Image (tube, grey):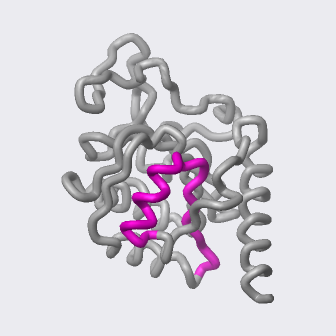
Amino acid sequence: MHDIEPYYKWRNYYIASEDKLSPFYGTTYDEFKFTNKIYNYFIHPQWDKFGSQTLYGKVLFVDYHEQVAMIELIGEWNDSLYNDIMFLKRKVVNPLIDEGVSKFILFCEHVLNFHGDDNSYYEEWWDEIKDEGGYICFINTLQHVQQEMERAQIQYYTNLGADLEDLDWRRRLPQQVILQVENILNSQIKQLDY
């Protein structure tokens, strides 16, 4: 796991530690010392800690004008034991919402397990952004992770599955990914209208 780095090819467009509005502004990273762990496994030092014992993330891109943030996650998402959604919501999402972000794209291919509990934090998150035309999208979740998310009934407040499961986002620029996700969401809405 220590070899899995957060996606770094968008650093020409955005660096969270240099963004004064970011919850990770001023964070410094030691490229040679591995301190963060998921259980007994060290992870790459570029991942950001936000309070969870088993889930880490990286804010890859934020466009405040377009009100969108893209976040990559790694680890085990455990709401049941560790209330990971609370940490993610309070430490990462809320500061971004306070700066006007209402659209959240979360890359989840490195989320290895999901253990759901109560979906009230997801409902709260959705309630805070829906009037701004916001959304929460989980991209490329593993099939068993998606099934667990659906068992926890978070799909009522988030977008996951279907066309959001096989996006080759790393070959695109941030604005292209945003456009692709929004096109998928718009096509899903059109299908519901028929």
| Residue 153 within the magenta-colored segment of the rendering | yes
**Relative to 191, does residue 193 appear above or below in the rendering?**
below
Q: Nearer the viewer, residue 184 or 194?
A: 194
Q: Which x, y percent locates residue 71?
A: 53, 48
Is 13 placed left or right of 83 in the picture? Answer: right
Residue that protrudes farthest toward the left in the picture: 81
Q: Tell me, yes or no, if residue 71 can be seen here.
A: no
Q: Where in the figure is residue 131, as x and y percent of width and height?
A: 57, 84
123 lies above or below 6: below
Quadrant of res 159: bottom right
Residue 39 percent coordinates (x, y): 24, 31
Q: Residue furthest bottom?
A: 194
Residue 75 painted magenta:
no
At x 48% / y 60%, what residue is drawn?
A: 96
* Location of the C terminus (image quadrant): bottom right
Asked if 93 appears above or below 141 in the picture, the reply is below
Res 55 quadrant in image: top left
Residue at 57% x, 37% y is 15
Q: Is residue 47 visible?
A: yes
Towards the viewer: 71 or 55: 55
Q: Residue furthest top?
A: 32
**Residue 56 horizontal/vertical position (percent):** 38, 40
Image point (74%, 50%), residue name: 177
Numbered range of the magenta stretch: 132-154
